[in-house]
Amino acid sequence: MAIQQQFHQVRNFTYGINRYAMADLENAILTLDYFIDKCLKENSSTVVSHAVSQLITTTIVFNFTPQFNALQCGGACDIQVQVPQISDHHLRAMARLTFSNQSEESHKDELCQVIINRRAVDNHERFQVDVDRNQDEILKIKEISRRKDPIHSHSFPVRPQDLNQSGFVPTACYVTYCQHAASHAIYCKHLPGAQNFTHILRLARMQIYVLSLVREENLLVEIWQQNVAERFIIDFRITSKDGIVCVASFDVNTHFKAEKLPFYEIPLQRSETCCNYDVPGFYRLRDRFNNAKLDTMLSYKVALDKMTMDIADIFGVRAAYSDGRFFPVRHEVKIAPGFYSILPDALVKCSIQLASMNRTSVIFDHILKVGSNKLLTISTKLVSVNHGRVANIPDSIMLLEALAPLLNKKSYSKVTCPNQIPIKAFKYSFTIRSNDIDINQHVNNAVYISACFDAASKAVSSGSSAYRTSFGRDFNPACLTELSASYYKQMFEHQLLDTFTWQDEDDDKLHFVMKHENVNIFYMTGNYSVKQISKL
């Protein structure tokens, strides 16, 4: 019996945004997976069998309208989910997304239609090509699998943060891998059909077919290009040391244009120095330990800052300072244990407070609560920058009567990065991917924090002597209670970063130093709870 359900005003779909403020496809797929699970749980007459719950997404086919690419940060979607076929070894689901920021009387713009297949894995962690697949799918897989002479190849390692709770790369990640490889091909001028990365994001159709499971290892992405009428098609083949992992095809349309759809008006309760609103479902996306993702929250905060500062202009800064930009140079994060176990659909309240300001910087406090429980406090120091130089904030802002009590109320001075890296420090290196770049066109601050978690994971799992404390077989960030981070320089796509981590001999803090070509980029210290470690 077919299952069907409609979900209205889904907002977190577009808070996971890419560098051009367009809906991020990896976030979109993970969100759709969540709503398929929700549909199954809420509409099944009996508990979904263990076999069905273990099925893995192996096929994703998106058919996009131009409006999908026009849906920017803050947009809301209605999602209609249908599950016409379900068994212990195969599940077929379809989803239709429409723009929900329109009256019921008007025609709703369709954003995309999606087909998702989930399948059972065999004893060798592979999915059979000819099982439960239609003929077009089989032909596409076999055709790309046999290709020779790619126009571009790019290899990179799987990051620990890429893995899901089962310990393998989820299907959504392959979209990011393909986009990153295509971006690298453009960087190397090996993809003549695309002048810049925006072309890779404007898709008419996307097909992802997964053939086997992958854990932490190196992957090779090979690329081919075909020109068809006004579109060009980019085909991808991803392989590991054990063979083909995934094939994909992006049907790119570089000619369509779409009007910008209106921003969704978030109901704001505001004053001259504070703004409150409900946070959409950030916590539907979990890490491999089933924690709410701290780095995702920090990454999404960029979109929230844009909504509240740039669009709503809650503190009047943007109106008076249209030529300037604010860049974060410090983060102070305090994490309550309950943050990591926030329920996926919990109603979370966010308060953004203007905590302090001086001639060149402002400090905002983001406070997240569930009920009366304060779960997360993020203090961010932003420096005023104009044409690449630190600039003064205009007097029209500084002299506002309501802001007078906040002048120099807090001060976060730049922390000096350690001059010497201890010999025992563990080194972890990674290259900036295309999806690490945010709407400010540089590496999102949360990427550095994610990389620190990855470095800690590698240090712990390798048995390095960099840490004295036993964190078990892997480093679970849910043990962390405080983070203090300083940013020294901006970083950009394809650059290599070296992360050094160790545990301090005196105060037991975890230290993370990030360098590019021996220049300090980022420094963070973390406090942890031994009590929390024992619970993990």
Image (cartoon, rainbow, N blue to C red):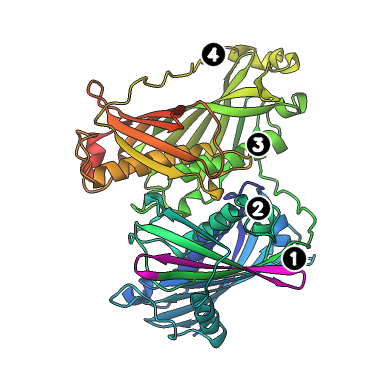
Please tell me whether mark 4 or mark 2 is closer to you in this view. 2
Q: Position of residue 27 (x, y in %)?
A: 53, 56
Q: Which callout, 1 or 3, points at the residue further toward the start of the chain?
A: 1
Label 1 to label 3, Cα distance in Å? 26 Å
Q: Which callout, 4 or 2, points at the residue further toward the start of the chain?
A: 2
Residue 338 can be seen, yes or no: no
Residue bearing mark 1: 108
Q: Position of residue 127 (x, y in %)?
A: 39, 77
User: Is the Cβ of the residue at disc 3 closer than 8 Å to that at disc 2?
Assistant: no
Q: Which callout, 4 or 1, points at the residue further toward the start of the chain?
A: 1
Label 4 to label 3, Cα distance in Å? 22 Å
Residue bearing mark 2: 197
Secondary element at tag 4? loop
Residue bearing mark 4: 409
Q: Residue at x 33, y 21 (%)?
A: 420
User: Residue 308 got which mark?
Assistant: 3
Q: Position of residue 460 (x, y in %)?
A: 25, 43
Which three-letter amino acid code belongs to the residue tagged 4? Lys
Please tell me whether mark 3 or mark 2 is closer to you in this view. 2
Q: In this picture, is 274 found above or below 106?
A: above
Label 4 neighbourhood size at 10 Å, few (<14), some (14-19), many (20+)? few
Give the magenta-colored segment's residue range.
Answer: 225-243
Label 3 neighbourhood size at 10 Å, few (<14), some (14-19), many (20+)? some
Label 4 to label 1, Cα distance in Å? 48 Å
Label 3 to label 2, Cα distance in Å? 27 Å
Q: Main secondary structure of the magenta part?
A: strand
